């Protein structure tokens, strides 16, 4: 699968009193790219509701490398960093690039799929498994081989 990268627009409301991007906006950008990626590959909210599952996040962190200011040109990507073979657990990584493709931040999150009726972790439907098996992978991608939940 081709790399998944989207341009982003910095809004005045995204800035803090120091006139650079507020820390929480990085997390909002990560959520935006994940939902865009999933929806563009058929995993809409309607699909998830019909199949009674959805993503949950266990951990999310951002490493800030370069300051982003109003007027910078930025984009964000989405890569699979880790996954279980059944795609039930995963780690996504987003890199936020500024101007000349300089990495300004790296956002990493660990998550899983939850059955929304049983309220328990689950293995996703085949469409999801196929999507994650073919999504862009980080250079240091690794399989998660643990079986605990």
Image (cartoon, rainbow, N blue to C red):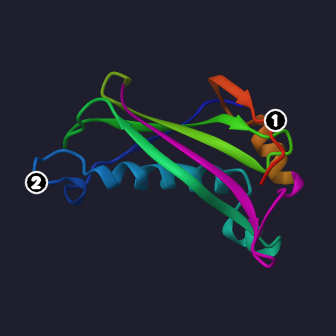
User: Residue 95 location in percent, x, y?
Assistant: 46, 34
Q: Nearer the viewer, residue 25 or 86?
A: 86
Q: Residues within 10 Å of mark 2 (few under 14, many from 20)?
A: few
Image quadrant where one finds the N terminus: top right
Asked if the residues shown at circle 1 and circle 2 are in contact, with their CB atoms under 8 angstroms apart, the answer is no
Task: Give whichever of discs 1 and 2 has the lower sequence position.
Answer: 2
Q: Residue furthest bottom?
A: 117
Residue found 80% across the figure and 52% down from its top: 128
The image shows residue 31, relative to residue 86, as above or below, that is below
Where's residue 107, x and y in %?
46, 40
In the shown orientation, is residue 83 left or right of residue 125? left
Question: Could you say whether the residue bearing mark 1 is in a helix, strand or loop?
Answer: loop
Magenta highlight on residue 112: yes
Left or right of 54? Residue 63 is left
- Tag 2 residue: 17
Residue located at (71% from left, 50% from top): 41
Image height of 90 relative to 119, above or below: above
The residue carrying mark 1 is 145
Start-end of magenta stretch: 103-126
């Amino acid at each position: 699968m081709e790399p998944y990268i989207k341009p982003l627009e910095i809004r005045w409301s995204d800035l803090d009193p120091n006139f650079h991007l507020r820390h929480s906006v990085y997390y909002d950008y990560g959520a935006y790219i994940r939902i865009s990626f999933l929806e563009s590959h058929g995993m809409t909210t309607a699909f998830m509701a019909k199949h009674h599952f959805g993503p949950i996040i266990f951990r999310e962190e951002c490493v800030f490398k370069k300051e982003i200011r109003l007027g910078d040109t930025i984009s964000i990507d989405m890569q699979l960093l880790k996954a279980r073979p059944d795609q039930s657990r995963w780690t996504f990584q987003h890199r936020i690039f500024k101007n000349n493709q300089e990495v300004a931040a790296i956002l990493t999150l660990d998550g899983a799929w939850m059955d929304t009726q049983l309220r328990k972790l689950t293995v996703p439907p085949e469409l999801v498994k196929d999507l994650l098996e073919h999504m862009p992978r980080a250079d240091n991608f690794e399989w998660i081989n643990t079986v605990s939940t």
